């Protein structure tokens, strides 16, 4: 089957420049970067809108992945704007998607809350452009977008599984851009995330490292709904919070559910962040249960003297608990995971 393309076959296609092949032309080969070639050679499936791969659509590639696969399937996606409402089903485990370039590969759709489709009405949970429902998913060099505009809740990317990774990606949208709709674990690294209101939200245990969060409205960055008893919710380490020029009054987060947990550590906080830091979602009772903390943040938006009294500044000793190993450990959740998650490429 096409998805079983082997390394040597892909390499042969690249090398046979004199052949008349629709897969990779000589001109294209001359422009290949080493990272492109490496990713292409290691792929099991290639997606290309021009027909030069195995599938023209990303959903077609997803459907080709064997159910309950014990080996990782690598899908290489060539540059293009793929307007598809995508679902990677729960049985399609251990899938990696790699884009030719982060700005060149865009997975996009335009559903939003309130939109009518026949007799159905889209809501937050069904407004996603891409829904990842399988465990052990990895995405690299991909832009996930909801292009509906400022029309209410419009999710670009929803995760409903465990042990999910995003590296060097972009999440583009407005309200509710990234929905961590899972009790599982998510790792996000070197990724750009933009939005207006609650553009990172949900109940996952998620670690964001070296990411940029770009606010486009006077509103809230996060809306965590961490389950009671979890040791971690959202943890941001070495991230940068920035915004549209002139924007002020943005908060670091508000609790979608009472036991929300969000921590920013060693992050650069822009001047658009309100000096109070956090919001109780118009419910003072949330101040008794939510855990909102910071540790050694810096930048023009850091003035801890004016932070809400119910937020916290971590001590050095407390900060030692926020390691990758501890955040993704089995015991990090009230109902323990079956395993400790050790981050891996495989």
Image: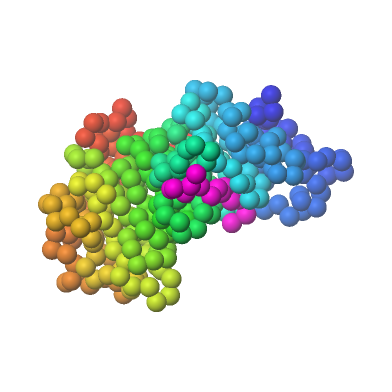
User: Which residue is at a point 68% across and 36% down the rendered structure image?
Assistant: 55
User: Which residue is at a point 53% across and 23% down the rendered structure image?
Assistant: 67
Q: Nearer the viewer, residue 140 or 92?
A: 92
Residue 320 place in picture, x, y as percent: 22, 51
Q: Residue 75, can we see it?
A: yes
Q: Nearer the viewer, residue 22 or 126?
A: 126
User: Which residue is at a point 66% across and 50% down the rendered structure image?
Assistant: 80
- Residue situated furthest bottom in the rendering: 246
Residue 205 place in picture, x, y as percent: 31, 43
Residue 173 place in picture, x, y as percent: 47, 56
Residue range highlighted in magenta = 103-116
Q: Nearer the viewer, residue 277 or 70?
A: 277
Q: Quadrant of the N terminus?
A: top right
Residue 141 place in picture, x, y as percent: 55, 50
Q: Nearer the viewer, residue 21 or 172?
A: 172
> How many numbered marks does the figure carry?
0
């Amino acid at each position: 089957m096409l998805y079983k393309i082997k390394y040597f076959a892909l390499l042969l296609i690249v090398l046979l420049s004199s052949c008349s092949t629709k897969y990779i032309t000589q001109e294209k080969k001359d422009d290949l970067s080493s990272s492109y070639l490496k990713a292409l050679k290691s792929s099991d499936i290639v997606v290309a809108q021009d027909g030069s791969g195995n599938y023209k659509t990303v959903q077609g590639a997803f459907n080709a992945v064997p159910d309950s696969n014990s080996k990782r399937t690598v899908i290489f996606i060539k540059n293009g704007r793929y307007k598809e409402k995508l679902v990677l089903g729960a049985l399609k485990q251990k899938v990696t998607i790699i884009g030719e370039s982060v700005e060149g590969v865009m997975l996009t759709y335009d559903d939003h809350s309130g939109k009518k489709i026949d007799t159905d009405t889209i809501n937050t949970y069904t407004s996603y452009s891409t829904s990842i429902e399988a465990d052990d998913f990895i995405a690299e060099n991909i832009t996930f977008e909801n292009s509906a505009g400022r029309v209410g809740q419009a999710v670009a990317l929803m995760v409903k599984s465990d042990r999910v990774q995003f590296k060097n990606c972009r999440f583009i949208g407005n309200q509710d851009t990234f929905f961590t709709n899972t009790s599982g674990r998510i790792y996000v690294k070197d990724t750009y995330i933009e939005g207006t209101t609650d553009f990172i939200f949900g109940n996952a245990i998620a670690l964001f490292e070296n990411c940029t969060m770009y606010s486009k409205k006077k509103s809230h960055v996060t809306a965590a709904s961490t389950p009671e008893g979890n040791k971690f919710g959202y943890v941001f380490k070495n991230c940068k919070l920035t915004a549209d020029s002139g924007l002020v009054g943005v908060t670091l987060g508000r609790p979608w559910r009472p036991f929300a947990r969000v921590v920013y550590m060693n992050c650069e906080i822009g001047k658009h962040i309100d000096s109070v830091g956090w919001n109780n979602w118009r419910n003072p009772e949330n101040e008794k249960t939510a855990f909102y903390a910071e540790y050694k943040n810096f930048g023009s938006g850091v003035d801890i003297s004016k932070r809400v009294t119910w937020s916290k500044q971590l001590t050095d000793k407390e900060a030692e608990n926020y390691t990758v190993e501890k955040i993704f450990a089995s015991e990090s959740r009230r109902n323990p995971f079956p395993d400790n998650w050790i981050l891996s490429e495989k």
